[in-house]
Amino acid sequence: MRICVIGAGYVGLVSAACFAEMGNRVICVERDPLRVARLARGEVPIYEPGLEPMLKAHLASGQLSFTQYLAEGIALAEVVFIAVGTPSGEDGSADLSHVLAVADDLGDSLEQACIVVDKSTVPVGTGQRVAERINRRLAQRGRRFRIVVASNPEFLKEGSAVDDFMRPDRVIIGCDEAVSAEVLRQLYAPFLRNHERLLCMGLRAAEFSKYAANAFLATKISFVNEMAGLCARLDVDIEEVRRGIGSDKRIGTHFIYAGCGYGGSCFPKDVRALIRTAEQEGIEPGILRAVEARNALQKTLLFQALREHFNGHLQGRVVALWGLAFKPGTDDLREAPSLVLLDALLAAGATVQACDPVATAGVAARYAQAVASGQLRLSESPYSVVDGADTLVLVTEWKQFRQPDFARIRGLMRMPVLFDGRNIYDAKQLAALGFLYRGIGRPALGRCMVSAA
């Protein structure tokens, strides 16, 4: 098929490359000329495993191209995907200005019938608004065809987005018109050969499904984090509890890991948007408010634990951080727990030595003054940042942090104190090596006296 993807951000890029992988002719429209130039050279502006080689291969084959001109992108398109951002507005609702601007541009530019698909995460009713705006402008221009708008929410995890797209656990198509729904079913058929998991439903139901899915996953995380807080008071190990409840098939093992809070571009934004939608409908979203409040509290726990350990005196302490991105496999810092911890440590006068495989550039730009003063030192080497440190804090569980040489680390640190923000380490093993271990909702093990700063 001939496809146009509007927006060369995270969702748009992955979608465009994967559709091209299946033999479709894809043109991706991006308004930023510098970004278009980079992409045309095969340079991927985000870190996402597997995306760059796929993009380069299909640029070379001619299956994929980039342009900043909408008219060029949609000229022969059979399906047009809208994949622009929907950030949080000041009141927490989804900002639809980019989506609606694209709708207006499509109404002013389309010269042939096609299917327009909302790939962006949008509130219920957005598809109808997009269709009305496009068709009203087409009518004003005297065009005799009408555009059908469908919803095709994305369920991509940063760090495994290419694999998620190529082998989806489900594809949701929301469309109120049977012929258009069938076209989209055919488009996705190659991705579903081994397991038919395509779900067709109404447009509004598809729009809501995306929000409900993310809100439910965020709720699971916040629930387990709240249980971890109670475990900490009752001398219970949340890891043992996690295994106990995760063996129940009704609960499952996914998204029940206690940690230092969730971040990223989806969960925080979508929970806020769903709260705002409920308020607008006169419904009190008590569960969603609790999820958001618990996550905000969870992001402060590591700093609270550090402050408690050092008796409130962090001035002059050297704190090593492992992991800055909000999750492994991405350089995305949006809503990352590491930023809450960094802000607090720097304000308290600590010196921070931080390591992340791919996210240090973003942190360096955000904290340029701290980097220039030497209060924040960034590295891609996990061992260099622990040299001379008073404590090590694991924030993001990258694979290269999972089995380090703890004997070597023990020798490099001033004090062998480890705060495990993701509960990935064996507490007994670390205590045997001479570390004081502190996890999330786990009993502290080992002993380490606080030295003079």
Image (cartoon, rainbow, N blue to C red):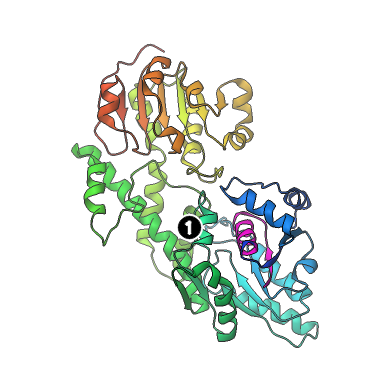
Q: Quadrant of residue 112?
A: bottom right
Question: Residue 399, image x and y in percent?
Answer: 44, 38
Residue visible at 59% across and 45% down?
47
- Residue 361 image offset from top left, x and y in percent: 62, 35
Residue drawn at x 35%, y 51% is 222
State left or right for residue 380 relative to residue 250.
Answer: right
In this rendering, the count of numbered labels is: 1
Q: Position of residue 303 (x, y in %)?
A: 40, 32
Reply above or below: 164 against 308. below
**Horizontal arrangement in the rendering, residue 281 relative to residue 100 (left or right):** left
Residue situated in front as seen by the camera: 40 or 262: 40
- Judge whether 238 appears above or below 26 on screen: above
Front residue of 193/439: it is 193
In this rendering, position of residue 200 left or right of residue 50: left
3 inside magenta stretch? yes
Q: Measured along the vertical axis of the image, is residue 42 above or below residue 144?
A: above
Task: Tell me where the magenta segment starts and ends, as one range.
Answer: 1-20
In the rendered structure, does residue 60 fall within the stretch colored magenta? no
Mark 1 secondary-structure assignment: helix
Residue annotated with mark 1: 272
Image quarter (top left, top right, bottom left or bottom right) of the N terminus: bottom right
Q: Which residue is drawn at 45% across and 58% down?
A: 271
Which of the pair 348/352 is nearer the observer?
352
- Crowdedness near tag 1: few (<14), some (14–19) or many (≥20) residues, C-alpha within 10 Å: many
What residue appears at the point 34 percent right and 55 percent down from the top-left corner? 220
Residue placed most toward the observer, 23 or 425: 23
